[in-house]
Amino acid sequence: MKTLILDRLYGISDLPTLPTVFLNVMRLMRDPNTPIKDLANAVESDPAISMKILKLINSSFYGLARTVDSVQQAIVLLGANTLKNVVISVSIFKAMGGQSTNSCFNREAFWQHSIGCGLIARYLGNRIDCERDEQGFIAGVIHDIGKVVLDRYFNHELADITRLVKERNISFYRAELETIGITHAEIGEHLAENWKLPENLVAVVGQHHNFSPDSDHATLTALIHLSDILARKYKVGSGGDNLVPEVDPLVWQTLNLEPGDLDAMDEELQNELEKSKELRDLLL
Ligand SMILES: [Fe+2]
Ligand SMILES: [Fe+2]
């Protein structure tokens, strides 16, 4: 079954592509001496995307004291790296947002789960001083992207998976293994590679359910493994089932955290999660 699914996956000729703005900004950012003006021009060549970017920059996500009304001003204020991250987030939603045609898959709840996971990862990353610079947010947003591929191209299989989740109250991940023998992690990894996303994001997508402390991007992957579970605990949207799995002990170790440390962060985490609905409405 797995080979069959993989054959179909590799054979999909109309996999969604990321907007040209994404490719141009990534190319320009490879040269650290690229003038701000050139970066701003690249973004502004797509008016719909630049409008979304400005909305995101002016949202509670950044909590800026004054309104930013041009991309150039945004780069001066927040830096080119932040702009790059915003471009990645907005591009992913442009390519993968939109309505689901399957009644068994709630896309809004799905994106709210992903954004919630991203907000938790951004908060924790800053608190424990790792993966700053919104890497956690993007990684959270994209970690379950394979589920959108299932939703778009594997309707019957998705229906079987969700039926099994309900009937046996098992995780989406387990139901995938039992029905199609492959999971959204592997499927998403294929898409992320296809998009030529940065290596650390590809690793998170592929490994967020199978954490290994020896992998190249262990910290970011550990951060998303934990944030995914916390998004479930705080009931932000839905990742496809309602279970709250145990955190892998090696994840605590890698992040230098203990379960009790989260108690002190509870209130701030809840405040962060308040932003998830606003962000979902803005990005979708
Ligand atoms: Fe997942
Ligand atoms: Fe998830």
Image (cartoon, grey):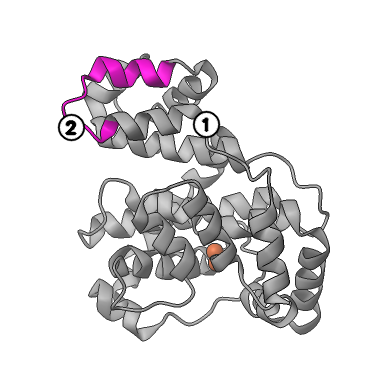
Going by the numbered disc 2, the residue's amino acid type is Pro
Residue 282 shows in the view: yes
Crowding near pointer 2: few (<14 within 10 Å), some, many (20+)? few
Residue segment shown in magenta: 29-44
Residue 270 percent coordinates (x, y): 44, 56
Name the residue that disc number 2 marks.
32
Q: Is residue 45 magenta?
A: no
Question: Residue 156 is drawn in which quadrant?
Answer: bottom right
Whether residue 115 sits left or right of residue 11 in the image: it is: left
* Screen quadrant of the N terminus: bottom right
Residue 161 percent coordinates (x, y): 75, 72
Above or below: residue 77 compared with residue 147:
above
The front one of 38 and 11 is: 11
* Screen quadrant of the C terminus: top right
Reading the chain from its start, which is encountered first: label 1 or label 2?
1
Above or below: residue 216 compared with residue 273:
below
Name the residue that disc number 1 marks.
19
